[in-house]
């Protein structure tokens, strides 16, 4: 038995999702994405933490959930938590919780930040610039 789907005023089927407007897409509250969690389970992911996927995205990654698959796609190159939140237009806190889930599953890894003491001094950088100009 086929059940007819309710139609929207534009004549298209209503799939049961609340749409704010044509560009916004379905409205899913951030707390629903994280099952109500507000803090990452593992590790501290600040906004400048750099995250990278441990492997390419696979068709089976859709089973994780679309938001997780989107994060995996963004993380194919090293990217900060703030950038991921910006790309996905999600609150940074929500992204941190979702990333902690992916870290737990070892689908992404956090790259160690550069130690400031290992960076070249201003004098060395100035000498390099002077050497390049001399060429």
Image (cartoon, rainbow, N blue to C red):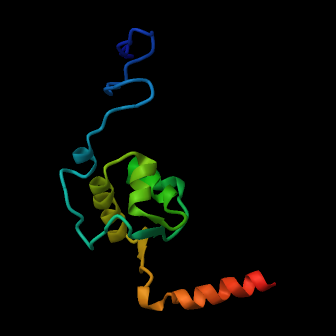
Q: Quadrant of the N terminus?
A: top left
Decide which of 101, 49 is in the foreground and name it.
Answer: 49
Q: Residue furthest right?
A: 135
Residue pictured at 39% horizontal, 8% vertical: 9
Q: Give residue 97's position: percent from left, percent from top.
A: 28, 60
Q: Looking at the picture, does residue 129 appear above or below residue 58?
A: below
Instruction: Name the image quarter holding residue 20.
Output: top left
Residue 35 is left or right of residue 91, and the answer is left
Q: Looking at the picture, does residue 23 appear above or below residue 103?
A: above
Residue 131 is left or right of residue 94, and the answer is right
Q: Looking at the picture, does residue 19 appear above or below residue 133?
A: above
Decide which of 123, 76 is in the foreground and name it.
Answer: 123
Residue pictured at 45% horizontal, 82% vertical: 114
Count of numbered marks: 0
Q: Give residue 37's position: percent from left, percent from top.
A: 19, 56
Q: Quadrant of the C terminus?
A: bottom right
Q: Give residue 67's position: percent from left, percent from top.
A: 39, 49
Q: Looking at the picture, does residue 100 appear above or below residue 84?
A: below
Instruction: Name the image quarter holding residue 42.
Output: bottom left
Q: Give residue 128's position: percent from left, percent from top.
A: 66, 87
Residue pictured at 31% horizontal, 55% vertical: 92
């Amino acid at each position: 038995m086929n059940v007819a789907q309710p139609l929207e005023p534009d004549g298209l089927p209503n799939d049961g999702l609340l749409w704010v407007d044509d560009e916004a897409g379905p409205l899913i509250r951030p707390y629903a994405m994280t099952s109500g969690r507000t803090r990452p389970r593992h590790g501290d992911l600040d906004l400048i933490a750099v995250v990278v996927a441990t492997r390419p995205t696979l068709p089976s990654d859709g089973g994780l959930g679309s938001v997780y698959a989107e994060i995996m796609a963004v993380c194919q190159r090293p990217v900060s938590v703030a950038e991921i939140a910006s790309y996905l237009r999600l609150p940074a806190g929500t992204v941190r919780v979702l990333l902690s889930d992916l870290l737990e599953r070892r689908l992404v890894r956090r790259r160690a930040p550069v130690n400031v003491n290992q960076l070249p001094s201003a004098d060395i950088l100035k000498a390099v610039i002077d050497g390049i100009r001399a060429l």
